[in-house]
Amino acid sequence: MHLVPTQQEVVALLRRTGAIRNGHFEYPNGLHATEYLQVQLAMRYYQHAKVLSVGLSRLLRANAEIRAMIPELSIVSPDTGGLPVAYGVCEALRANQVYWADRNRKEERGTMHFRQFMEQKPGEKVLLVDDILRSGRNLSELKNLVESNGGEVVGIAVIVTQPTPNTIDFSPLPLYYLAQLDATYYKDAGSCDMCRRGVPAEKVWI
Ligand SMILES: [Zn+2]
């Protein structure tokens, strides 16, 4: 495998580990899709996690501005799902630190916050890391939280991006990913080909 795995190699790895699944899926927001992706299924295997996070770190290191910040760089994840990626990237880059946000679990989609004493220092350089970029809601909320604490977001890095018609655009912030998956989305059951053909839909949580 290349030092930076190719799109085909990443997709093959994700399929082999069950992280990419083909079928007929219904998301909580009502979208129907032909493909479902759960990167954490691939991150269960340490060697795969390592290949993916080292590959991602090489893309980051190729950016001269980010490379210059590595010793002071914080790698921050919107929740625990991004942690294997965050630690892998931090180790490969030899960046400064890793931490992550939490949500208030008493509410359905509770407010995002950091643990006590974990807020950014003013001017802190922060790289946002997650396993996947789909709607971008979590990363956008994390970006706002970091910035409201005086941190400076310098980029976003994910293993896979799977854009939907509603994905948030983070430009001009640099976005790094190893693979892009283009599933076919339908905005609801009424416009879904598979529903029309009577294929049973499987509900997915995220
Ligand atoms: Zn459908």
Image (tube, rainbow, N blue to C red):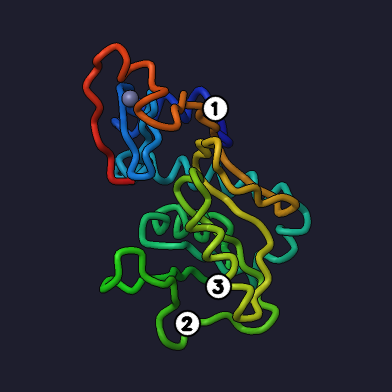
- Looking at the rendered structure, the kind of residue marked 3 is Leu
Task: Determine crowd level at label 3: few under 14, some 14-19, many 20+ residues with C-alpha closer than 10 A.
Answer: some
Q: Toward which corner of the image does residue 156 lie, by quadrant? A: bottom right
Q: Name the residue under label 3.
A: 145
Q: Residue 118 carries which label?
A: 2
Q: Residue at x 37, y 35 (%)?
A: 37
Give the SS element for disc 3: helix
First-in-chain label (2 vs 1): 1
- Looking at the rendered structure, the kind of residue marked 2 is Met
Q: Mark 1 points at which residue?
A: 7
Q: Choose mark 1 or mark 3, whichever is in front.
A: 3
Q: Is residue 115 above or below residue 186?
A: below
Asked if ligand 1 lies within 8 A of label 1, the reply is no
Give the SS element for disc 2: loop
Q: In this view, does 187 lie above or below 206?
A: above
The location of residue 32, given as percent across then percent down, is 37, 30
Q: Nearer the viewer, residue 162 or 20?
A: 162
Task: Determine crowd level at label 2: few under 14, some 14-19, many 20+ residues with C-alpha closer than 10 A.
Answer: few
Q: Residue at x 38, y 23 (%)?
A: 34
Q: Nearer the viewer, residue 105 or 146?
A: 105
Q: Residue at x 25, y 36 (%)?
A: 203
Task: Determine crowd level at label 1: few under 14, some 14-19, many 20+ residues with C-alpha closer than 10 A.
Answer: some
Q: Choose mark 3 or mark 2, whichever is in front.
A: 3
Q: In this view, does 101 lie above or below 129?
A: below
First-in-chain label (3 vs 2): 2
- Looking at the rendered structure, the kind of residue marked 1 is Gln
Give the SS element for disc 1: helix
The location of residue 41, given as percent across then percent down, is 30, 40
